[in-house]
Image: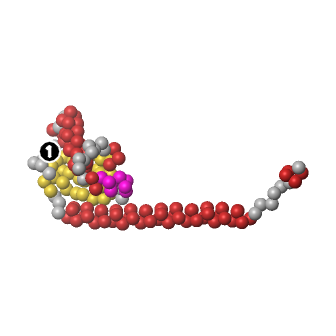
Amino acid sequence: MLMKLAPKKHNPRNFYLSVAAAILILCVGRYFAIESEREKGTQLALLAQQLSQLNATLPKKVDRLTTLEYVGLSSSDTIFYRYQVNMKESTLSEEERANMEAGLRSGLERLACKETKFLAAMRKYNIHMEHFYRARDGELFTIEIHADQLSCPESKR
């Protein structure tokens, strides 16, 4: 009975094995984190290069009033589009501005939903789009599109 109450001798091998396992798990996790960051950096560099090539061909007429002036990567997680609208901001009422913004937002969201590969990359690398519209005499509005907030209809195959 007294032998059962006596402290047991612990085998130091188990302690060293658990420390080695913890270090191994930390190293493997760190390796995959570094690889993920490296892949994200490579993809962002490729995206920035493609956007600069696209930007070189601008300005592009979107419609009779709107011209796309600039496309670029801003703060490594935002694709920034700048549009010039050929009208004065002061000529629009608040209701007209809200209707214009809602119409453009729905069109941009539909367009984003059609680009499934691009949308998947946006989700994977946590990138969003920002569309900035300005008039001749001031800012009209900014539309942000986040891939995880879009409700895209399922594509039929």
- Verify whether residue 121 appears in magenta: yes
| Magenta stretch, residue numbers | 119-126
| Residue at the limit of the structure toward the left, as seen here | 64
Q: Is residue 140 visible?
A: no
Given the image, on which type of amino acid does mark 1 rest?
Answer: Met
Q: At which x and y percent is residue 122?
A: 33, 54
Q: Residue at x 70, y 63 (%)?
A: 14
Q: Residue at x 72, y 66 (%)?
A: 13
Side of 45 where 33 appears, left or right: right
Side of 121 where 98 appears, left or right: left
Q: Is residue 152 visible?
A: yes
Residue placed under numbered mark 1 in the picture: 87
- How many numbered marks appear? 1
| Residue at the limit of the structure toward the top, as seen here | 95
- Verify whether residue 27 appears in magenta: no
Q: At which x and y percent is residue 156?
A: 23, 47
Q: Secondary structure at mark 1?
A: loop
Q: Residues within 10 Å of mark 1 (few under 14, many from 20)?
A: some
Q: Residue at x 22, y 57 (%)?
A: 70
- Give the camera-side residue of 93 and 118: 118
Q: Residue at x 30, y 52 (%)?
A: 119
